[in-house]
Image: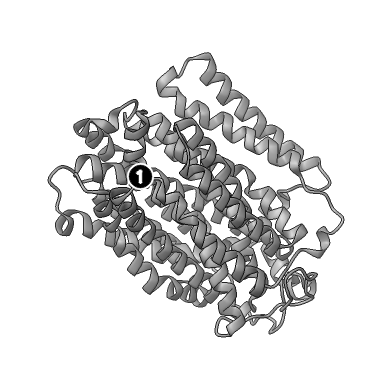
Amino acid sequence: MTAAGATAPTGVALTVGSAAGRWVLIATILGSALAGIDGTVVGIALPAIGRDFHVGISSLQWVVTAYTLTLSGLLLVAGSLGDHYGRRRVFVIGVAWFAIASMLCGFAPNAPSLIAGRALQGVGAALLTPGSLAILQASFTPDDRGRAIGAWSGLSGVAVAIGPFLGGWLVEAVSWRLIFFINLPLAVVVVAVASRHVPETRDLTMLGGRIDFTGGGLVSLALLGIVFGLIEGPTLGWRSVAVLASIASGVVMLVAFVAHEQRTAHPMLPLEIFRSRQFSATNAVTFVVYGALGGALFLLPVQLQQVVHYSPVAAGTSLLPVTIIMLALSARSGALASRIGPRLQMSAGPIVVGLGLLYLSTVGPGATYVADVLPPVVIFGLGLAIVVAPLTSVALSSAPGEHTGVASAVNNDVARTAGLVAVAVLPAAAGLTGSAYLHPAVFNHGFHIAVQIAALVCASGGVLAALTIRNRPQTVPPRTCCALDAAALAPARHAALR
């Protein structure tokens, strides 16, 4: 392993059971948990934020989507930055940036400044998110990558699930502002561990190349235009000039982005990675499943607090079974997919999640936890444990080895963009606009419709996986290789492009 600041190694071959491997897992899990916890904690705090700032549901949507917008728009650039300048270096910078932006959110005096702070948080999350997975893929031996990614998925999920409980307690006991301040000590730990124990890896073929900032700008503007139109459409009117112009400009920017990536010498998104049918199919499944999850989980904390009259702590605690299930089963799910192939779990998992969401849509006034909330939460958690680790592993393994960082960024970007679109579209599709969240009967009716839609969409992701995902023949991988060893990765790379 290299020391901090050293050049890229010619080979990294860590194992999950080694001390060095455990330190890498600690850094990547805690780093990714920073971004994940923040997303779930903010959901619990939305009613309190809305009351403090006296804003409607569109402003609450922007509190969520401002973060996801910059995160989604910059993930691809961040993946390239990591491959070019070093994955550990960009990861550490992202963690530090995220901490500073969190502090700004905590001190925000009004909704616009909070939304701006959230956008800055998204920049930091974009820098650290693809790096966490790319570091695992580049640092561990092929035999241990599945176990490492399974452990990362499970323990990151645990951290994300604990977040709402902790955030709910902070919102109820002190203030929603503390949900941002708690990021600071965790960020200090991550920076210290990563700087000392994580090996530096990069794509040596990118040395001397250029970063595609033009592509990053185009895709960011595309997302901004489309999302602004979708969020503001119910308020300004779908036929208003501002909404139509925003959506149209977003589509134009998206087309320009694809055209630019095809002709530039150094694209941030090498379009040839989509020649792998497995990679393309996995990302299609990711978009469908994570879109359903993003939309439903945006509305659930509001439903529990405003309609069922849970306290913020109770609303956060209600999802703790997901923590237990992910901790117990995610690593095993990743190992099982490595043995039997990912198709079965990627097909069954979204359907199980969809059943949980469909059951969850019945939660309303007078619901009790044991009879009405716990059963769908357990089903939901089982579905996530089944699908998350195999989906993540296939997204990385089916792309060319020299594009590990970009492949990680693409899959994360697809997931975040799906949630971004769902948060913008689903409330309006269910009739939840304006101050609906302040009127329990109105919100309850819209919640039922929205989550039923999300359940059907999620289950369709399982059907899509059954039709498109293939189980590749298992081969014995080389005992020593890393993401930078072109010879060792050549067989997998060629298979992915067939």
- Relative depth, front residue between 193 and 136: 193
Q: Is residue 482 above or below residue 357?
A: below
Q: Is residue 60 left or right of residue 377?
A: right
Dividing the picture into quadrants, the one containing residue 223 is top right
The percent position of residue 477, horizontal first and vertical second, equals: 66, 80
| Direction left: furthest residue | 366
Q: Is residue 94 left or right of residue 206?
A: left
Residue 451 point in image, percent of width and height: 31, 43
Q: Estimate the x, y position of residue 247 in percent, counting from the top left.
A: 56, 25
Crowd around label 1: few <14 · some 14–19 · many ≥20 (10 Å): many
The vertical placement of 191 against 1, above or below, is: above
Q: Is residue 320 left or right of residue 329?
A: left
Image quadrant containing the C terminus? bottom right
The quadrant in which the N terminus is found is: bottom right
> Mark 1 = which residue?
45
Q: Residue at coordinates 62% horizontally, 81% vertically from top-left?
A: 20
Seen at 81% across and 42% down, the residue is 264
Decide: is 430 above or below 376.
Answer: above
Residue at image position (78%, 71%) is 6
Q: Position of residue 467 (x, y in %)?
A: 48, 56
SS label for mark 1: helix
